[in-house]
Amino acid sequence: MMDKVQAPVAAGELVLSLRGISKHFGAVSALTEIDLDVQAGEVVALVGDNGAGKSTLIKILAGVHQASAGTMTFRGQTVTLADPSASLALGIATVFQDLALCENLDVVANIFLGKELHPLQLDEVAMEMRAWTLLRELSARIPSVRQPVNALSGGQRQTVAIARSLLLEPKLILLDEPTAALGVAQTAEVLDLIERVRDRGLGVVMISHNMEDVRAVADRIVVLRLGRNNGVFYPDASNQELVSAITGASDNAVSRRSGRRRAQTAPAQEAQP
Amino acid sequence: MSGDKEGPAPLLDRADERVTHETGIGGAIRAFFDRVRSGELGALPVVVGLAIIWTVFQSLNSVFLSSNNLVNLLFDSSTVGIISLGIVCILMVGEIDLSVGSVSGFASAVVGVLWVNEGLPVWLAIIAAVAAGGLIGSLYALLFNRFGMPSFVSTLSGLLAVLGLQLYILGQSGSINLPYGSAMVNFGQSLFMPHVVAYAIAALAGILAFVTGYRTATRRQAAGLSSQSLNKLLFRAIIVVVVLEALAIYLNQDRGVPWMFGLFVGLVVALNYALTRTTWGRWVTAVGGNREAARRAGINVRLIYSSAFILCSMLAALGGVLASARLASASQQAGTGDVNLDAIAAAVIGGTSLFGGRGSAYSALLGIIVIQSIASGLTLLDLSSSLRYMITGGVLAIAVIVDSLARRSRVSHGRA
Ligand SMILES: Nc1ncnc2c1ncn2[C@@H]1O[C@H](COP(=O)(O)OP(=O)(O)OP(=O)(O)O)[C@@H](O)[C@H]1O
Ligand SMILES: [Mg+2]
């Protein structure tokens, strides 16, 4: 059974398929009957308002939470993820919204946490080399990889978390707001990286509140609203469509705001000769 | 990436121009002061504290620093020191074991009963005692992992329960004398390294420090990473050899270096290796720093907690066995009184954090020497134990204050 899961991914193969996933936290239904498909070589963007359940869905895929109902199929096999190591063993790598780094350990130790080289005599030189290579691919601005993570800025920490997810050639990468804290150059680098990873045939799920970033890299945009599926869009969908799917109404704060702006700028343009 | 600068390509880890790097021995000294100022104190506070304590007691009583008294000090440090090593393990994962004193007393009782009363071979009795310690530790691990019982509570009840067990198996007599002249009692009282062996070990430590340092340096150089210069490595190795040889010469003027202390230091070095150079140690540090992050990295967090609880109790039991060898008896008093708090205080005074994720095996060695120095100095001055408790308590408070201030300084200097 494991053979198929470990084999290299074929282009267009259905990597991940969720059917009817629900998750309750006591009386709160964070997710209700979620369906989601991710193919190899595809970037799926997961969008939705604050509290829509995006992070909860990612955590279920990472084995941090267990779904209350529904089935999960990974590369054709029905799987249950009892804990994070089960998810990692399948080849699912995750960058969490709260990053989940050990602040007392240095950058190298964090990148290799759980995957150290040479258990009985840690190979620090090889690990440091690999860490620098990964960080360079991300154009990371990290002065020293021997600093504890506590001493890094928010964006630097995010880069470390992303570098960690790339370490072991995963089959599926889950990124929960990977660019939220990044600078201009680093955001571009991460978007490039997402495209490179996709071109290598991996499946990518990305959460972002930045519609520009989403449109730039996503092949499909899946909208969640109040814990339910609320439509699938393609990057050519208009902003209006996306926003109303996210907020659930055509009359919403975002469209009212842009309507006001148009009304303000239009007379100003008429006044010009 | 590179190529935007003239001259040779910078080393892989020295490419960022914002970080200053010190070179040479003068630079190393400057970097050391920088680290201290930013709160990365390491063993400095405890070494300074030790220097003050030794100066004060030596000026009050010139016997204090005599070879004879130091040899006794090493004997007394070894037993509680080994217990304190276990405390380092459990503090590293951010938990605590308050029952190490009782476990050590129980272990000495097990040896007394099995060896003297039941006539089993002594090695079998020792193995049984340490295994009993491991069993107690796995019980704590079970309570912690399955029922979420805080270690503070489970080990506090363990303190009472295991003490009861100790009194029970000792029975009516309440005390068992271990035979003088037996190998075990000799080990605890009068077995010393031959002088040559002590000198050889001291030299070997320096050579080993140099060889491993040199091998790392050449590997890092080959990989294009910054590495320590040969001079610095030699300088460090020579300092190690000179200090250790001087110590050995001084102790050899009296009876020499106790084998029991040799065992303690051996265990310290082994635990230091395990904590810093193996995956287990890395995971222990990770769990102590951020348990949820460790779990999400796929680490079996429960297994790590279990290993820490079991190792702590086993080391406590071993310390208890050695304490009974030192006293040539297993009694109801063994492991009671200040053993518990001395062991915990030693680890904290030595610099292991009470909050998990930060510490070193060497803190047990340095901390216990501080505590035993105070005890020995006050005994020489013929002062009662009331004063000793007060002073040890004060030193512990100072150690925790230093740790907290250093932590604050680390945060503001970006080294937290
Ligand atoms: N551990 C938990 N216990 C109880 N409720 C939770 C827990 N985690 C999430 N929730 C609830 O589930 C809902 C969805 O949360 P989730 O973190 O998935 O939102 P999100 O879509 O990631 O939002 P954001 O864009 O703000 O990150 C929220 O109402 C939240 O309160
Ligand atoms: Mg979220």
Image (cartoon, rainbow, N blue to C red):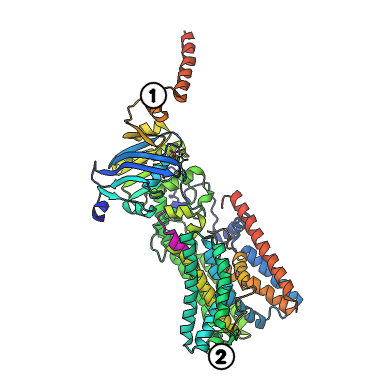
Quadrant location of residue B112?
Answer: bottom right
Q: Are marks 2 and 1 in contact (CB under 8 Å)?
A: no
Q: Secondary structure at mark 2?
A: loop
Q: Specify few, some or many for label 1: CA neighbours under 10 Å numbering under 14, 14-19, or 20 or more.
A: few
* Identity, as a three-letter code, of the amino acid under mark 2: Pro
Where does the image place residue A177, in percent across and percent down from the top left?
A: 43, 39
Of A214 and B38, the residue lying toward us: A214
Magenta region, residue range: B297-305
Question: Which residue position is annotated with label 2?
Answer: B179
The reply to whether label 2 and label 1 mark residues of one chain is: no
Where does the image place residue B306, in percent across and percent down from the top left?
A: 46, 65
**At 43% from the left edge and 54% from the top edge, which residue is drawn?**
B295
For marks 2 and 1, give the CA distance. Answer: 91 Å
- Whether residue B104 is visible here, answered yes or no, is no
Question: Which residue position is annotated with label 1?
Answer: A240
> Is residue B298 covered in magenta?
yes
Of B306 and A148, the residue lying toward us: B306
- Whether residue A87 is visible here, answered yes or no, is yes
Where does the image place residue A179, in percent across and percent down from the top left?
A: 43, 39
Chain bearing tag 1 is A
**At 35% from the left edge and 51% from the top edge, which residue is drawn?**
A81
Q: Secondary structure at mark 1?
A: helix
Look at the image and tell me in which quarter the N terminus of chain A lies. bottom left
Q: Quadrant of ligand 2?
A: top left
Query: Please, is residue A198 above or below residue B368 in the view?
Result: above
